[in-house]
Image (spheres, rainbow, N blue to C red):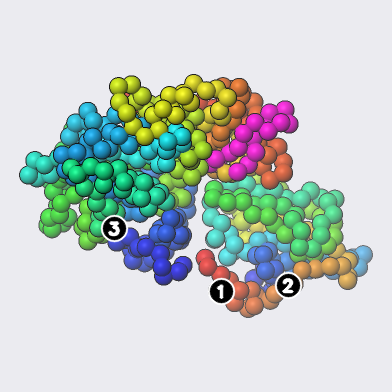
Amino acid sequence: MTTSLLHTPLYEWHVAHGARLVDFAGWAMPVQYGSVVEEHRATRRHAGLFDVSHMGRLRFEGPGAAALLDGVVTRRVADQRPGQVRYALLANEGGGVLDDVLVYHLVNGAGGSYYVMVVNAANREKVVRWLEPHVLRRRDVQMLDVSEAWAMLAVQGPRACELVQPLLPELELARLRYYRASETLLDLGGQRAAGVVSRTGYTGEDGCELMLGPSAAVRAWDLLVAAGAVPAGLGARDTLRLEAGMPLYGHELSEEWDPFQAGLDFAVDLEGREFVGRAALVARRGDMSLPRRVGLVLTGRRAARQGDTVCEGGLRVGEVTSGSFSPTLERPIAMAYVESRVAAEGTALEVDVRGRREPAVVARLPFYRREEPGRTM
Amino acid sequence: MRPEELLFTRTHEWVCFERAADGSQIATMGITAFALEALTDLTYLELAAPGTQVTAGQPCGEIESVKAVSDLYSPVTGEVIEANLAARDKLELLNQDPYGSGWLLKIRTQEGAARVELLDYAAYQRQCAEEPH
């Protein structure tokens, strides 16, 4: 591990607790503390605690913030009410995906409205560079990269909200609906700190995410661990999101593919608004000559991995973008881009796994859906 | 078997040799506790079938975990005479007893047949200490 990597405020905790650290987008991040499968199962059955401070956090202030954002993301955000969070995409002029993001509309203590865009760590610099000219063209909005000033924790699982609630004296989490967020005061064992809590996540479980200052993040982490939340690394985060059918930039999302190919139509509003990439997306929508994202369940034991070739009757029809053994399904699952003619659920395909064809069936996404109602992305 | 009595490859297999009645040697191999700890969460093990001719330094199976897949490399050139199907079907055996009931293959080899470079336990431990874990 070179010293040039960025450290989250929890870096010392990770090291002290035996985490296996990897370079993730320039950050030294824990991939696992012990067993990926145990961290995965703890999240599905109880509550997993994730340091996601490496995610990029961009803050937009000024009267033009909503108009700026509405002109750069694929989903309408101009009508987003304070307290709402929306999943959206940034597209290039050709309709390819630059990043997938969450847009938060928040209100500060003085009643002032502002926005936060959470972007992928690997895309942060690219997105900031790409947004800068859009920001500079206006005089009524300011963009601040607060990624390194704030930390971010995700608490995910059926018991997540119950464990976080004691830290939130002024907010009843049960009343904060899915994809809602609020600034709130945190009570960290007598110490008070400001933060933002949102009912969001990347695991397919109920739960929340906290944005807060570095020392508050360390205190909150300690309190949540003491309360029984199970620290979980990026390894479990990856298998959890894969089971939940959630795309990961650099795997299922890239500038090569558009949001429709990725099956993210819900995150694109083409009507009655202008945004970067709109013309290309209008043209690409419904183009069935383009490959589609699908889920695959493999019938053998060997897991398909990113880059493996997908075949039908010996002919190449696509490529695997993510694959792993699924701890919940206890069999290998994958996501892939395949020709649309073989993208229908139930289609029998094969994946070339290290030189040997393994049978696979196109499966409905997500592979895993938690039982509680009311979940939308 | 105590690890101090075994020999080790640079690719984290262990091996021990016994002389058979016909004068050939039987190499029993497995993978080391160090490699198993690095892999964690084993999901799949594939072993060359008895009768397969294997070559020193070439794959003789594969071992897969949630995060990654690795080849197993044969320490010797020879013929597989037995594969540990109990370990294949119960992967916990590898972690529970990597140098005993978690053995993987028995390979019949001849005096003078090719072998990869083999380290004693102390040298292998030095190699592990230098590797990022």
Q: Are marks 3 and 1 in contact (CB under 8 Å)?
A: no
Tell me which numbered mark, 1 or 2, is placed earlier along the sequence.
2
Amino acid tagged 1: Glu
Identity of the residue drawn at 39% across and 29% down: A278
Alpha carbon separation for disc pair 3 and 1: 32 Å
Residue at mark 1? B130
In percent of width and height, residue B4 lies at: 65, 75
Q: Which mark is residue B118?
A: 2
Q: Are marks 1 and 2 in contact (CB under 8 Å)?
A: no
Amino acid tagged 2: Leu
Alpha carbon separation for disc pair 1 and 2: 17 Å
Choose between A345 and B116: the one closer to the eye: A345
Decide if residue A320 is in sight here.
yes
Residue at mark 3? A148
Q: Secondary structure at mark 1?
A: helix
Residue B121 is covered by the magenta coloring: no
- Please tell me whether mark 2 or mark 3 is closer to you in this view: 3
Choose between A149 and A202: the one closer to the eye: A149
Which subunit holds the residue at mark 1? B
Q: Relative to A80, is A303 on the left or the right?
A: right
- Please tell me whether mark 3 or mark 1 is closer to you in this view: 3
Alpha carbon separation for disc pair 2 and 3: 48 Å
Which subunit holds the residue at mark 2? B
Res A353 → quadrant: top right
Which range of residues does the magenta coloring cover?
A: A307-323
In percent of width and height, residue B98 lies at: 63, 61
Decide if residue A239 is in sight here.
no
Res A377 → quadrant: top left
Q: Main secondary structure of the magenta part?
A: strand
Identity of the residue drawn at 85% across and 54% down: B53
